[in-house]
Amino acid sequence: MSYKLLWMLPVMMLATACGSAQPKSREKSKKQMTTNENNKNLEVATFAAGCFWCVEAQYQQLDGVEKVESGYIGGHVENPSYKEVCTGTTGHAEACNIYYDPTKITYDELLAAFWVAHDPTQLNRQGNDVGTQYRSAVFYHNEEQRQKAEDYKRKLNEEKAYDNPVVTEISPYIKFYKAEDYHQDYYNQNGSQPYCVFVVKPKLDKFKKVFADKLKE
C-alpha cells in the first residue's frame, strides 16, 4: 500500500491561506482548556495537519468520530487568540481533538487517515499555509498512542512511502485551548468562502475517495 499523497493543489487564487480567510462571524468565545467529553466510552486523538478547518472537515466524515474540536496546542502562550497564533510566535499549532468510539473506529485507522490527510514531509507548512502553527504533529494522550505514532512514522520512512522524509512531530498532549466559536464546524458553516472552495473542498473530496468504506452514511 502506498501512502503518498493523492493531491497537490495548485494556487487557484490569492486568498488561499488559512490565516487570511475571513469568517462569517467574528464573535469569540471565552477560551478554556478542554476536558474529555461526558461520554466516557469515547477516546480522544489529537492531530495537527495544517489548517484546522481542513482537518476538522476531513475527520467529521469518518464513521465512529463523534465530535471534532478545533484549537491550539504545543505552545508557550496561555489562552492564545487566533490572531496571536497566526503570528507564528506562540509556539502553538492549529490542531483538532477527535472524539471517537473505539468500537467503531480505531486509533490505528485515525492515524492512517492522518498521514493521508496532509503532507507530513513539509516542515512548518502545508502548501501556502506557512509557519510553525501549520506544522505536522501527533499529540499523544498515552504511551500506546505514542508508540503507535512512532512506529508508523518509522515504517513510512523505512519504506520510503514519500519522496522526502516524514518530519511529523510526536509530542505529549498537555494543554489544548479550544479555538474561538467561529472556527468550530467551520467548513459546514462557511462552505462558499474562497479558502473552503479552493483548498478545503478538494482535500475533502480526495479524502472521502480514499476512505469511502469508512464514511458515515
Image: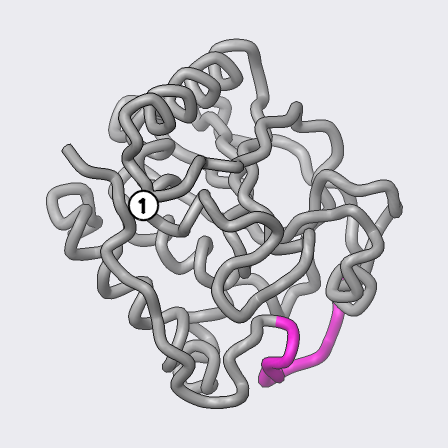
Quarter of the view holding residue 65: top left
Q: Is residue 37 left or right of residue 174?
A: left
Circle 1: is it few (<14), some (14-19), or many (20+) Cα within 10 Å?
many
Q: Residue 154: in sight, yes or no?
A: yes
- The percent position of residue 4, horizontal first and vertical second, equals 26, 45
User: Where 34 sits versus 125, above or below?
Assistant: above
**Residue type, mark 1 in image:** Val
Instruction: Identify which residue, 111 or 153, lies in the foreground.
Output: 153
Q: Residue 37: in sight, yes or no?
A: no
Q: Is residue 17 left or right of residue 60?
A: right
- The percent position of residue 8, horizontal first and vertical second, equals 32, 65
Q: Quadrant of the N terminus?
A: top left
Task: Give the residue at x 28% y 45%.
Answer: 62
- The percent position of residue 146, horizontal first and vertical second, equals 52, 17
- The percent position of residue 140, horizontal first and vertical second, equals 57, 24
User: Where 14 sits versus 64, above or below?
Assistant: below
Q: Is residue 123 left or right of residue 113?
A: right
Q: Residue furthest right?
A: 77
Task: Give the residue at x 64% y 26%.
Answer: 171
Is residue 196 shown in magenta? no
Instruction: Identify which residue, 124 or 83, lies in the foreground.
Output: 124
The magenta stretch spans which residues? Answer: 19-29
Q: How many marks?
A: 1
Which residue in the structure is indicated by mark 1?
A: 116
Which element type, helix, strand or loop, lies under badge 1? helix
Task: Give the residue at x 48% y 12%.
Answer: 147
Task: Give the residue at x 58% y 53%.
Answer: 70
Is residue 26 shown in magenta? yes
